[in-house]
Image (cartoon, rainbow, N blue to C red):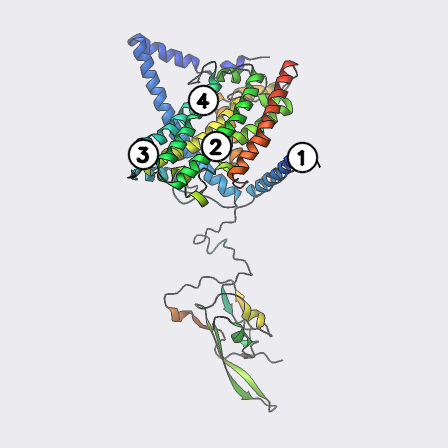
Amino acid sequence: MSKFGNYINGYFSGLESLLIGLRTSVRVYFRKPVTEQYPENRHTTLHIAERHRAMLVMPHDENNQHHCVACGLCQMACPNDTIKVTSETVEGEDGKKRKVLVKYEYDLGACMFCELCVNACPHDAIRFSNDFENAVYQRDKLVLKLNHEGSSVVKK
Amino acid sequence: MNTSFLDYYSIQPVTSWIHEALCSVMPEALAIFIECVVIGVVIVALYAVLAIILIYMERKVCAAFQCRIGPNRVGGKGGLLQVPADVLKILTKEIIRLKNSDHLLYDLAPYLVILASILSFSCLPWNKGAHILDMNIGILFVLAASSIGVVGILLAGWASNNKYTMIGAVRSGAMIISYELSLGIIVLSMVVLSETASISGIVESQANGWNLFKGHAIAILAFVVYLIAGNAEANRGPFDLAEAEQELTAGYHTEYSGLHFGFFYLAEYLNLFITAGFASTLFLGGWMPLHVAGLDGFNAVMDYIPGVVWFFGKTFFVVWLLMWIKWTFIRLRIDQVLVFEWKYLMPTSLLILILMVVLKVFGLVF
């Protein structure tokens, strides 16, 4: 194509892309603001996305049972040594030996919220919740025990 | 064409009554002196108030373009006292004089910038009979006066004795001088359309239709080119490479503090208002009400809105357009800025001028 043709083409394609930019920004202009007025709307309109990773939790059902089989895969997957699974071996009625979870310790202060532990878990026993107000005054309060008192694993 | 509406809100009778009342108690020279002082104070006060309004508007509009809320804590629900608080803060700051700067030029620069801005500010047509500086070559005077600002910017960059300020000032100088060409040519094409270079004459020539509509698509094109060149003249939007925070800290006013910096800041926002004000004067009929041919009832209602309201309404609309441009486009590099002007904008504006002359000569305008 000739130089002049290139110039004219560039002129109009440039104009077109500028107009697309203007159209996009004016659409955003009339959108609702996404700002969260945090301390004020704490109990009213605060919206934290469901997928937000703020804290590791171990869901328990109504019988105080969880899905953790104490395999320790999460502990091995964790890059920060955040998780410490303590287990003991117990002989069941059928004579088989099983690992049973005693204590699932999670150090919130060392966690970097990568979700590798949740991905590693074969039983979906742990997940991240969006409960983000976790500030405390002492570091040792950040070390949490995730399994509830007297809880047991769900029987298959 | 019924033009009696032009006299509804003329403040000419009021001003001449004041003048006569003053003349009856004192010599005319003294009366004129007092009037000039009062007008000067009014202009400076209006200048400061408008700067506060514009900064608030900029922050709110920019927030909306980014899906934010903007200032909303200081002074009740809308954050109305945020900008006045910032202004008060800047008044309390120390003016730092650098040891190795050129003191005379360093102190002079902000005054040149604000002088250029106030001179062109006082040429705006506020209302019928409220033209403060009005002469038969008014629009050329505005172009000349607003060019003083670039001297101030260059001096500020040079006198600060700092590499960042120098780069910012040189960039800004190259850019403003280039874009003045486009701006001047577009203004000239509007002078051709209105057959006068006086600002009040340009406004009055639009009594039977705004220039934007009179000149068909050519005038709309001219309006767009004017907005682009005006944006560059005001050192804003995609053309703010004189400041370019990310690379030059604050460009030419890096070394200024306190009220000196305040002057640059004020002039920047008022240049935005002046650009918008002359856009509304040249293209949108200044203080002229909107008339649609054939709708007499509608036209009569429009006539009841005072000219000053029309002027501010149009000007703030154009300010909004300029903010839309600013918050959409990314900053250009200096070579891109100059290529854009010399290879695209200048030929376009020359073409507009020629087409406008052809339209006018053959009587194809309304």
Callout 1 touching callout 3 (CB < 8 Å) = no
**How far apart in space, not on screen, are marks 3 and 2 (Cα)?**
22 Å
Q: CA distance from mark 1 to mark 3?
A: 48 Å
Q: SS for tag 1?
A: helix
Is residue A117 rendered to the left or right of residue B247? right
Q: Can you tell which quarter of the image residue B324 is in? A: top right
Q: Position of residue B136 (x, y in %)?
A: 47, 13
Q: Residue at x 58, y 73 (%)?
A: A121
Q: Is residue B20 above or below residue B150?
A: above
Nearest to N terminus: mark 2 or mark 4: 4
Rounded to the nearest angstrom, the CA distance separating label 2 from label 4 is 17 Å
Mark 3: few/some/many CA within 10 Å (<14, 14-19, 20+): some
Nearer to us: label 4 or label 3: 3
- What residue is shown with label 1? A3
- Identify residue for label 2: B174
Q: In the rendered structure, are the residues bearing label 1 and label 4 in contact, judged by CB atoms less than 8 Å apart? A: no
SS for tag 2?
helix
Q: Where is residue B82 drawn, in percent x and y?
A: 39, 41
- Marks 4 and 3, how far apart in space? 26 Å
Q: Quadrant of the N terminus of chain B?
A: top right
The label nearer to you, 2 versus 4, is 2
Pointers 2 and 1 in contact (C-beta within 8 Å): no
Can you say whether A145 is above or below B89 in the image?
A: below
What's the distance in space between the residues labelled 2 and 1, CA to CA?
Answer: 27 Å
B33 or B141, nearer to the observer: B141
For badge 2, the amino acid type reads Ala
Tag 4 residue? B144
Q: Position of residue B21 (x, y in %)?
A: 34, 10
